[in-house]
Amino acid sequence: MGYTLVYTQVLEFLPYLIKGAWISLQIAILAFFGGMFFGLILATVRTFGNNISNKIVICYVTFFTNTPQLVQIYFLFFALPEFGILLSPYIAVLLGMTLNAAAYLCEIQRAGFLSIRQNELDAAKTLNFSLFQQVKYVILPHIMRVLFPPLSNHYIIMTLGTSMAAIFGVEELTGRAFNINSETFRSVEIFSITALIYIVITFIATFLLAIIGRYFFKAKIRIIQ
Amino acid sequence: MPQIKIKSINAFYEKLHVLKNIELNVSKGEIVSLIGPSGSGKSSLLKMLVGLLIPKSGKIYLNENLVNFKNQSDLRTIREQIAIVFQQYNLFQNMNVLKNVCIAPTKIQKRDPKEVNEQALNLLEKVGLKDKLKSYPDELSGGQQQRVAIARALCLNPQILLLDEITSALDPELVKEVLDSIRLLASEGMTMLIVSHEMNFVKEVSSRVVFMDEGSIIEINNPRNIFEKPKEKRTLDFVSKILKEK
């Protein structure tokens, strides 16, 4: 093989790639917290709602967890304009990832609701805790402890999933790697550096999440999987 | 003057009639044990006294004041005066031993944290857990958790202590350490209602014993009579069965 690695040619694009990584992080964080919020509403309806609302949520979750995320975003980006709704690539990806995350995070948060221990709530009531104090001292710490590991795993998966945005022309990390590749044709160097940046940002996120989980929620999270 | 006066109480779990026409008076400093087969309503009676089960009819007086279970302020009042220790300990898993004991006195009763901390340390020393202050419930044995639960209840300075089958989830060797803690409290004159299957313990510490079956009080008697010459046949059947099993 006569290929010679020339990183010097690619390293000058590093700041450009890092800016792309920042856009990837933005999409991941916004979609994750949007998905958490929407998923929390769905989980509340699924746990405490009536039969009809329950079935609607089941249909939503089934659809979004059984179809590829890429197809869902394609639908938002290419099919919605037929109905007069035109979304920018960034918004289509963000919305698609949020709706998809809501389905998964609904199920994760529902598991948290179901794991609340009635006997701890009974103790809290007999100790005269108000509802707000029950939520603050008993329910939330318990839910966060139980949910922190699956939630942080999902966040990491979503960060990596932002690379899909490149297909729609969003200039996040992978999108920018495509651009540099078409300009320099140094594919090995570009994509190895891109992969390294992904590893760094996911490792930093895993490390921070593990610290938060361990010290604030006493959740058992491994830093290196 | 009875500290607790229960008059014609009926309570239900959905359609199940769990307490039927209950009449019971408990005086200050008295230790009343509730015995009877599983499902006889003993635990339901204790739960009702702390407002976890709302009676459908009847009246309860605490220190001669009528309790309205639908009134939050009345519920708060009874829970300030009555503390309960549950069969399954019901400790807060996200808090260490000291926090489990201190949280209600500091955050709910708004007492001085320093004074509460001192009292908690004394109580935990009394129940032999002074070296476990920073441990979490899942790091403790069942007996240790139960003793934390007792310390938590006592740190509220209740007038009345309810103990719901506190030894039934424990290994036999752990039962002694928990019962020793209760004996100590009994000797200090606290009013207690105890649900227990430990008949020797019931015989030893109780002022009176209440036998319950199918949600009703069948007999109230002193410990000696209830075990040796009960008035009711159902009491006799239960007591002889239990004593034979032992």
Image: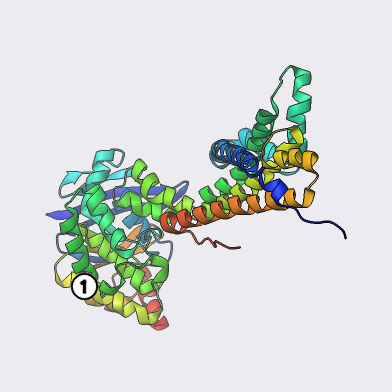
Give the tally of numbered discs: 1
Extreme residue in the left direction: B1
In the figure, is residue B45 to the left or right of A149?
left
Task: Give coordinates of residue B141: x percent, y percent.
Answer: 39, 74
On screen, residue A17 versus residue A120, left or right, reads right
For the N terminus of chain A, the image quarter is: bottom right
Kindly indicate the quadrant of the structure image that contains residue B184. bottom left
Question: Disc 1 marks which amino acid?
Answer: Lys
In the displayed image of the protein, which residue is found farthest to the top?
A: A84
Which residue in the structure is indicated by mark 1?
B126
Confirm whether residue A36 shows in the render.
Answer: yes
In the rendered view, would you say B56 is above or below A210?
Answer: above
Vertical arrangement, residue A171 with respect to residue B234, above or below: above
- What is the x, y in percent for residue B185? 19, 69
A176 relative to B36, above or below: above
Q: Quarter-wise, where is residue A32 in the image?
A: top right
Query: What residue appears at the point 54 percent right and 61 percent down from the top-left corner?
Result: A223
User: On the rendered structure, is B58 left or right of B61?
Assistant: right
- Horizontally, is A155 left or right of B23 in the view? right
Between B93 and A183, which is closer to the camera in this rendering?
A: A183
Front in this rendered view, residue A207 or B243: A207
| Quarter of the image where one finds residue B47 | bottom left
Give the chain letter at badge 1. B
Viewer-proximal residue among B214 and A25: A25
Quadrant occupied by the C terminus of chain A: bottom right
Q: Residues within 10 Å of mark 1 (few under 14, many from 20)?
A: some
Can residue B202 be seen at all in this image of the molecule? no
Q: Residue at x 74, y 40 (%)?
A: A180
Residue A197: give x, y in percent of width and height: 64, 50
